[in-house]
Image (cartoon, grey):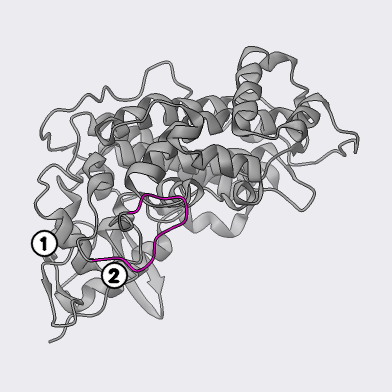
Amino acid sequence: MFRFLIYILTSCLLIISCTHSQKKESVVAIESTDSSGPKDDWFPPAELALFDSVPTADRNISAEANSLEKDFAKVKTPDELEVLIANIEKNYKAVAEVERVLAAELLLLKPFRAYNTMLNQNSIGMLGTDFLTLATGMDTSAWKKNSVINSYLNDSVEKSKRKTISPNDVQYHLEKEFISRVNLASQIVYDLKQGTYKTECTFSCSSNKTVTPLVALKNLSLISAKLGYQAAYKYSDLFGIRKTADSKTVIEGSSKAGPNIVTFNNSDFEIRSAMKDYFSLLSIGRESKKWLKYSYEWYKMYIAVSIRLDSTQTKLSNAFLGNHQIAFKGKVVLVNLAALFDNPNPDLKNFMPTKFDDKKRPLEWDVDSYKAIFPNLRSNEEVAFHVSALADYFPGGLPFPLNIALNTATMIKAKK
């Protein structure tokens, strides 16, 4: 039975790979950026040999805390956590294997502190953990409950004395710090052998704060896939755009100005109005071809591990095969996820509404842009339903910033 499952997995992924590679590669290059694409020596998605080398059986973990867990328990301030992270970097080989997932999670925090200092205090008006959920799809609930980590992500510039990151440097920081760290964490987890490992729950865990390598790798693969898609588009200006209307609610600890436009409390009308004058915002980057390939490869890994963990997810094996029928709310919708990677829209703003009613609700969209991913789409009346179907089906949920352009929370059917 196990060999049969491996055969099915191998066949599915070979079909995905071959079909994807045969598609016409056509990516529109707009305005150059500082992006250089993912480095050749970064950790690539694992091959299917993973399924032979990483058993799913668990082993018990001693209740006695090891050295890293003890050190982490003693940390009381963000600066102390920074020191601990630096020590892990220097002496990673000395970390007990049972704690290496915890070590990988702590290593992943470092670029988030600098990033969220800029976003939370100077621009976005969101808590650092909330932004990470929006941008990466991470489950940051455990970080929110940990006062030291929460303070680390949301420490003010004055308290941390860290260099403020300019909104124009966000793209560079994403590619240089975020993605390289996630790659490092992926490699650490992939190298783990049979067992369950102590965790801070960032990569999902059971009630006793342990996680298997496959579960950790599944979540890291999804994060890598979403970050790769994010890096293909330009969005730095997004963090400088604010609502023009007065805001009655100010998030504690954020700047006094109103919350950033990317928060989902804003309507499509407000988002579209704020973005329309920024030509380069959400447009495709110069190295998008490399980043979209990187994203696709990690999505493929995420799907493979998801199927290994849950055989009912085999339907995902067809996710990037081009035109593919999916069932949603009793209807069949034809979707083409591959178009988002093989022939991406040069500007995600093209997916935003083009007309609103007197209550500022969206009425019309650029149907031609939508037909690339919904070949059978016929009219504006069908846009909202099709987007809802896509959001429900997309492996791991819509990646940022596509989830901004396709704002399912406020979409309604167009009036006839």
Q: From the top left corner, tell me how far across and down residue 33 is, in percent.
A: 18, 28
Disc 1 residue type (three-letter):
Asp
Mark 2 Cα shell of 10 Å, populated few (<14), some (14-19), many (≥20): many
- Of the pair 202 and 84, the residue shown nearer to us: 84
Task: From this view, report whether residue 67 is shown above or below residue 354.
Answer: above
Circle 1 Cα neighbour tier, 10 Å, few/some/many (<14 / 14–19 / ≥20): some
Q: Residue at x 76, y 25 (%)?
A: 97
Q: Amino acid at mark 2?
A: His
Tag 1 secondary structure: helix
Q: Position of residue 274 (x, y in %)?
A: 17, 57
Residue at position x 21%, y 77% in the image: 361
Does 279 sit above or below residue 414? above
Residue 371 in sight from this viewpoint = no
Q: Which residue is mark 1?
A: 368
Label number found at residue 386: 2
- State the SS at label 2: helix
Query: Relative to 360, is 86 on the left or the right?
Result: right
> Magenta stretch?
246-256
> In front here: 339 or 384?
384
Magenta region, mostly helix, strand or loop? loop
Q: Is residue 99 magenta?
A: no
- Residue 416's place in the image compared with 9, above or below, is below
Residue 116 in the image: x percent, y percent?
43, 39
